[in-house]
Every structure is written in C-alpha cells, then in structure tokens.
Amino acid sequence: MKNIKNLLFIALTLFTTQIAIAQLPDPGFVIDNTTAIVITDPQNDFLSPDGVTWGLVGESVKKNGTVENIETLFKLAKANGIPVFISPHYYYEHDHKWKFEGALEAAMHAMGMFDRGDQLNKEDFEGSGADWLEIYKPYIEQDYVTVSGPHKVYGPEQNDLSLQLRKQKIDKVILAGMSGNLCVESHMRELLEDGFEVAIVGDATASAIIPGLDGNQAAQTNFRFISSHVYTTIELAEAIKNQK
C-alpha cells in the first residue's frame, strides 16, 4: 500500500509540474537587424572527444547533437548576415594563483581546462584544449565575427561582451554554446540583467551529467523559465527564414 501511495504521489507531482510548465508564458522572439548570435566556449576542452571534460559532457553533447548544431548556427549566420560574437574561456598562469574556488572552478583548474600561458603567449595554443574546435575555425575567422575577451568563471561580467554588443547596436541575443548550466546560463542571466532580449538554442548546448546530477536537465529547465524563447536549431532556421 505504501508503494502504491508513493507511486500516486510521484504521478501527481509529475502531472502538476507539466501543467505548471504548460502555463508558463512564451513571450517569443522576433529576429531583426539588432539581433546577434552569441556562442560561449566553442573550444576543444568541451566539444572534442580529446577534451578534458569529455567524460562529463560527452553524453550530453552527443545526445543534443551540439557540435553539429553549433556549426549550423555559424552557417545560418553567414547565410543571413547575422553578426556572431564569441565569448571564450581561457585560464592563464596567474589564474591558478586564486585563493578560493567554487566546486567546478576547482575541477577546471585541476584538470588544466582552457589553459594558456598568458594573454600574449600563443605557444602550444594551436590544437590545445583552449583552441577552437577545428571545424569551427573557418566560420570564426570571418569579419562579421567578434571574439570578446575571455570570461573567467561562468558569466560575461568580467569581459567586454556587452560592450562589443552595444557598440554594434545589438539589442537581441540568440545564445548557445557550452556548457548549458554554467556559462550559457550565466551569460543568459547577465545579458538579461544588462537589458538584452535573450533567446536560447537549447540543442546547441550541452552540460555535464554525473550520477545524481543532470546539468543538461537543469539548464533546459532554467532556459525555459528565464529566456524569452527556447528554439531548437531547426526551429531557429525556420524562424530566420520567416522573420529575417
């Protein structure tokens, strides 16, 4: 009897949750000439099977089709004249002297994630974990792509992303990249607080999944709660076709 009650309780909770989600408004997102695509951390350490985090994020990357979907965003931007902004993640030698860290900061530093010598040193950078995923390089090395300074923890508070967007008269951001529940979500929150309208491409992100903790599920939930709209890559392509 106790098991039956537990099952009924779980079923009722799930049903109630689905109703609540269905009742969330979807404000929508209109793509116009003040819209840009922002991609966080399109780098080897997140997206390559040889990257240091692949054991944590690989399952989510493969399930979402993240690598291919980010490439599609680059293609859509090029075909439709949409400016692209990249917010990368680099750790320099002096960053390893920090006196305190959060849980995943400590993990990233311990595994040498996104490591570079210093701001002016590109020795051994090519093909490293901090370098762009190879298939993205032809898209990023374009005159309509702006690479901001590196963000240092998760959000863009410490780099010049907002300044670069404002200077190009961008008011609306289509956001994607890695990782969903950390850098993408933190960029979403800060850009919203900074007055930008933000939509997310949910399947052009991925997150760490470890026993008992599903970062991808957490990210997708918060994307829906916080952003103006959550697209799939296919939906975004259709929206650009209809609105641009």
Image: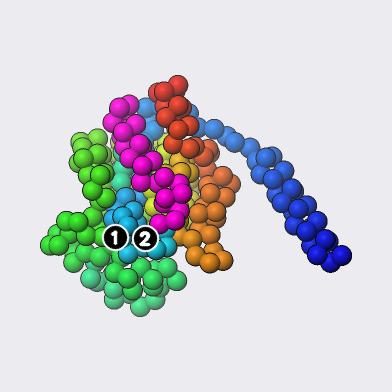
Decide whether the magenta segment is chiefly helix, strand or loop: helix
Q: Is residue 19 left or right of residue 203?
A: right
* Residue 186, quarter of the rendered image: bottom left
Residue 124 is situated, as x and y percent measured from the top left of the image, at: 14, 62
Amino acid under disc 1: Asp
Dot 2: within a 10 Å radius of its alpha carbon, few (fewer than 14), some, or many (20 or more) residues? some
Dot 1: within a 10 Å radius of its alpha carbon, few (fewer than 14), some, or many (20 or more) residues? few
Q: Which mark is residue 54?
A: 2
Q: Is residue 139 above or below residue 184?
A: above
- Which residue position is annotated with label 1? 50
Q: Is residue 110 above or below residue 63?
A: below
Q: Is residue 60 magenta?
A: yes
* Residue 53, quarter of the rendered image: bottom left
* Residue 48, quarter of the rendered image: bottom left
* Residue shown at 20% from the left, 36% from the top: 143
Residue 186 seen anywhere in this rendered image of the structure:
no
Residue 191 is situated, as x and y percent measured from the top left of the image, at: 43, 47
Q: Which residues are magenta?
A: 58-83
Q: Is residue 99 left or right of residue 10?
A: left
Residue 200 is situated, as x and y percent measured from the top left of the image, at: 47, 42
* Residue shown at 45% from the left, 41% from the top: 201
Which one is in front, 118 or 191?
Answer: 118
**Which residue sits furthest right?**
1
Amino acid under disc 2: Trp
* Residue shown at 45% from the left, 33% from the top: 234
